[in-house]
Amino acid sequence: MTNLCEFCNREVVKELPEKVFTIQCGGKGCGHRTIFGLENEDCRQVILDDGE
């Protein structure tokens, strides 16, 4: 089952691959979290699980 952010619907992942880039989420509800773009996966955007 895929875990999604309840505010922006991006996938929440436990670990990141080696090649990523970062951007800031524009949504106020999720606290403007850092979004990671996965270079080797067609720049798919994910959020890193913060353990909460």
Image (spheres, rainbow, N blue to C red):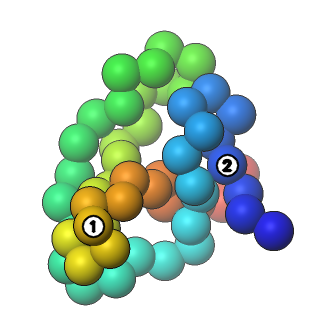
Taking the image as shown, residue 44 lies to the left or right of residue 21, namely right
Residue 44 in the image, given as x and y percentages of width and height: 36, 60
The count of marks equals: 2
- Nearer the observer, 12 or 33: 12
With respect to residue 37, does 42 lie above or below? below
**Identity of the amino acid at label 1?**
Asp
Residue receiving disc 1:
42
Residue receiving disc 2:
4
Residue 13 in the image, given as x and y percentages of width and height: 56, 67
- CA gap between label 1 and label 2 equals 19 Å
Q: Residue at x 23, y 42 (%)?
A: 23
Taking the image as shown, residue 26 lies to the left or right of residue 39, namely right
Taking the image as shown, residue 1 lies to the left or right of residue 46, namely right
Residue 50 visible: no
With respect to residue 19, does 52 lie above or below? above
In which quadrant of the rendered view does residue 30 lie?
top right
Q: Secondary structure at mark 2?
A: loop
Tell me which numbered mark, 1 or 2, is placed earlier along the sequence: 2
Q: Secondary structure at mark 1?
A: loop
Residue count near mark 2 (Cα–Cα under 10 Å), binned few <14, some 14–19, many ≥20? some
